[in-house]
Amino acid sequence: MSIAIAQTRRDLAIVVRSRGEALNPLAFFALATLLFGLAGPSPETRAAIAPGAVWALAALATTLSMEGLFRRDVEEGALEQLLLHARPLWPAVLGKLFAHWCVTGLPLVVLGPVAALALQASTDVLPALALGLLLGTPTLTLIGAIAAALTAGIGRGSLLVALIALPLCVPTLIFGAGAAFAAAAGADPTPQLLWLAALLAAAATAAPFAVGAGLRVSQEY
Amino acid sequence: MASPQTEPLLSIRGLACSGGRRRLFCGIDATLRPGDAIEVRGANGSGKTTLLRCAAGLLTPHAGDVRRAGGQAPLYLGHKSGMSSLLSPIENMRWHLALAGGAASPAACGAALEQVGLGTERHDPCGNLSAGQQRRVGLARLAVSNARLWLLDEPFSALDAAGRALVLALIAAHRAAGGGVLCATHEGLNLPDAQVLRLPL
């Protein structure tokens, strides 16, 4: 437990000091929303697809942010120290991912509804969208981390991370967008939100072990 | 049954490794007992770092067997410092101590940094320090370590004369306390009573 806290503190301190890097995925999200707004057809169509667009862009932004998750640690040798000392590895992995999510996922919970509003979605969808993003973005981070761990040993591999992670993100995307669309149609989004919570529970249980195994393999060169 | 005082800290039997497609070394045997030191010597590219990474458990060897006593993680000081360039020496040290499970306090971290000559730079980001100073942050880890097995990869690199003397003093103190040191070096540290393991190229 203390390792998880120490890792979170360390990574948050690093992220705060490398501001530009941490803001890149959020800037991507904001710009892509803007482009959607400009390129979209009639306001009605835009409003109708807004929740789906927000979710797709959130998944892309999260995956984009995962590429650099371990790069600095690999280059500076912190990863090998982690592999040597943190046994089991998963508490440190959870700490690291929590820090990463605080910077890339949590802002999306706020930015997502704002983006939906900018795309002229009705205000009815906002609670389901925000709650869905709160439950869904940690899952996206956990899944993306598996891909990032597997590619940690090969340097820059952003496209590879996306290719591995995005197919695995599809269930989260479907239920997340589904919750918002249900709310837009005046239905109850609870079932979809419960599915998102179940996916999060599964990912939080399994992914830290997968990430640990991936990191161990990545250092065997 | 050997007592914990004489049980080898590290024993390597028939170790073979390859780097890329090339076979680096094979049939390496070594036993490191408490108070011992082994200098691994060889030219650039002969596999010194690979041998150390195998001994640390970071690499799975091609063949052979590596045993470390007590299940305790060794202290591995490699070419990469393991220190984040965005964090200060004291922040890096705290993370390392949390990892190694040591009970050393922030005061002990400060004292260790003082000992390696970084008393005034302890709050500067490591990225702003010189190569030798960054190396010294790594030496501060040696000063507070409670690991019995030390694996040092070129401990003299980037260090000035005072830094080298500091490394030798730390190693001597560690050996006197019953620890063991396996270090890779191309020039030779000339540690007293050290075994020398030569890697052919």
Image (spheres, rainbow, N blue to C red):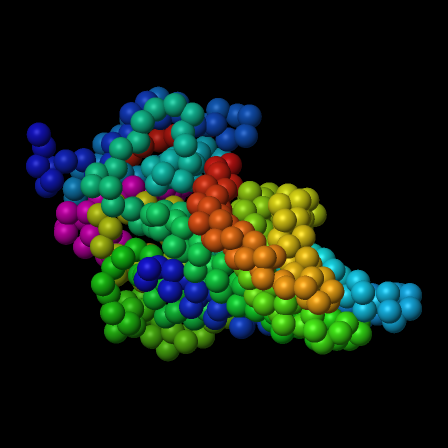
Quarter of the image holding residue B182?
Answer: top left
Quarter of the image holding residue B97?
Answer: bottom left
Q: Which of A46 and B18 is in front in this view?
A: A46
Q: Give the range drawn in magenta.
A: B167-187
Looking at this view, name the residue that lies furthest to the front.
A187
Looking at this view, name the residue that lies furthest to the right.
A41
Q: Nearer the viewer, residue A195 or B116?
A: A195
Quarter of the image holding residue B52?
Answer: top left
Q: Which residue is drawn at 37% across and 70% down?
A: B90
Q: Residue at x 70, y 47 (%)?
A: A159
Tell me if residue B8 comes above or below residue A87 in the rendering: above
Q: Let me know if residue A159 appears in the view.
A: yes
Residue A176 image point, x, y percent: 64, 58
Q: Nearer the viewer, residue A87 or B167?
A: A87
Tell me if residue A213 comes above or below residue B144 in the rendering: above
Asked whether A160 falls inside the magenta stretch, the response is no
